[in-house]
Amino acid sequence: MKPYKAALGVIVFLLLLGASATGVLAESKTGPQKSKVTPGVEVFLQEHLDWVEGKRVGLITNPTGVDRNLVSTSDLLNEHPDVELTALFGPEHGIRGDQEAGEYVESYIDDKTGLPVYSLYGPTWKPTEEMLEDIDVLLFDIQDIGSNVYTYIYTLGFAMEAAAENEKEVIVLDRPNPIGGIRVEGPLRSEETVSFMGRFLLPVRHGMTVGELATMWNHEYSMGIDLKVAKMKGWKRTMHYEDTGLPWVMTSPNIPTKESAYLYAGTELVEDTNLSTGLGTTKPFELVGGPGIDGEALSAEMNQRGLAGVSFRPAYYTPMFGTQEGQWIGGVQVHIDDPSKINLVALGLHLVDAMRDQKPERFEMTSSYANLIGDPDVPRMILDDQPVEQIIDSWQNELETWEEEVRNKYLLYNPYPKGSKPYKNEGALGISPLDVSASVNQSIDLTVSGYDEHGEKLDIDPEEVDWTVNGDIGKVLNGVFHASRKGKGELRAEYGDYTAKRQVDVSTTWLENIRHGIQEDYTRVVFDLNKTISNYRLEEETGQLRLEIPHGKIGGELEETGGRIQINNSPVIKNIHYERNDDRFVAVFDLKTEEISYKTPSYSSRIVVDLMH
């Protein structure tokens, strides 16, 4: 061996030895490396491709749907020889994440894959029958952030509803709850405060993954769909996102960092007031404040309140967009000291309380605050200056009951709460329709379907279904519910070892108002009702659209004998005639075109028709 080669070998050996020693030293200082998590998409591709063998696949995703190497799920599936990907679906902010909050997202053809991309935000929240024509199974792969007002989980819920109604399968490619799976906080959402959330009633901080939410909804709302969850490997409920080892992809334009994602479930409670959540700055949901607020005084007050896991510093900023664009805002920056100790809902309410106390004469709250927090009593309690602890106590018993009797039955990851066991799939039974609302003497056809623990469809003989009706509101004969008395009750279907339940409301359907609004892309017509119904008919005729609601009566702000509503400045509709015809409410849309494309997004206690321009 030549001398320089020997010397080079010694140098390399010493460098390797030094690197090894450095590694040992680093480990001794910092401890073992944090656990790594394998996301559901990778587990699915490695272990569960048989779930989609011979099936056409639709994927609901956005930029957060990536593997550990940041390769998008849409690319992984589209390029995989054993997956037949036929369509993509985009939630709020779109499949590429480039749409602002609340912005209507168009359906289009994706340039990269050549596949149709259907919007599930805007006029259509639930996949339609037409969207699902070329699909056998829907895959969901989106990163949630653990709050009950972040819309992606409801996109999942509505997709499950569509699957139940159209006999499609659903697979959830699970991802971490970035704010952990231990803490559950806030009031359980009241039915009085439902908007986009539909039937899905959750507390502010639910402490579940999307796979766990889907499992719970499939059973608790008796959807009876063939649901599978590609579980993560390595995730524990005690983890926060920084513990997972996964790369962070901003979940939406105003959630750019792990810190904003973590604080969102708390500082979002500053919304729907005249205060600021930091939107329009580079630190949304970390910066909070308000016009005229003294940042130094607020910081001192918040630090004095001794909230665990967080500290505060004075901050001043000028939002570049949003409702307070260009205003000088005083407030604080919230710093995370120990994420496992933070009560996020208490954090948000204390911020509102402290800023209101500083400028009580200037504090304002919108009528939407009840929808934000999910409890119709909380706005009054805040305005009455009730202590935050007293506000939290007002819902705590109901929250703990829900947590113990409902949520904890569907958890897929450890450590499990004391007295709880891992969820074991035993199949699911469902009742259609998902909303049963009737008037006295009205009859509604019911269908029972479901799947066993292996995902095999149950071969159900309708005559073998055992029906019971609680509430003395009617009876079920030969699979038909006959409403006989006003009231609320429950239908129960039993088939073998399976049980499904459906809440039912027997009451008069009142049409209380007809409203309209003209957007850039569509004209929206809203029929306000006294309850949620699904048994209406909407039919297109030449130059007209006809809405019929069985047993519907006219009340509220409408003329009892019928009338006409003029719609000005719409390019597609002239007016709406409405009347009571025999035993039904009828509304006829007079169109400006012979044919019309329309959408019917789902809302609680409303029928919404979007006439596309």
Image: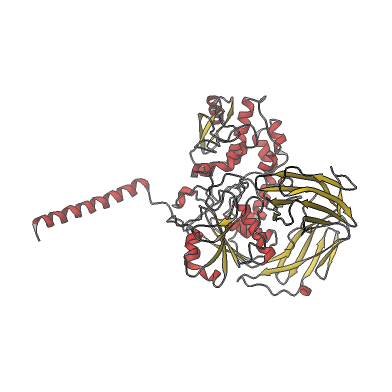
Looking at the picture, does residue 73 appear above or below residue 352? below
Going 10% across and 61% down the picture, which residue do you hit?
1
Task: Say whether residue 321 is left or right of residue 490.
Answer: left
Residue 578, given in percent of the width and then of the height, sits at 84, 50
Which sits in the foreground, 434 or 607? 607
Way the structure is coloured: secondary structure
Q: Quadrant of residue 541?
A: bottom right
In the depicted structure, whether residue 298 falls above or below residue 549: above
Residue 444 percent coordinates (x, y): 81, 63
Figure check: 402 above or below 569: below
Where's residue 536, x and y in %? Answer: 79, 58
Give 552 or 573, whichever is nearer the viewer.
573
Q: Is residue 73 left or right of residue 525?
A: left
Can residue 227 be seen from the camera position used here?
yes
The picture places residue 191, in percent across and down from the top left corner, at 73, 48
Say if residue 419 shows up in the picture: no
Instruction: Name the residue at 11% across, 55% down.
Output: 4
Residue at 50%, 64% (x, y): give it.
44
Q: How many numbered markers are drawn?
A: 0
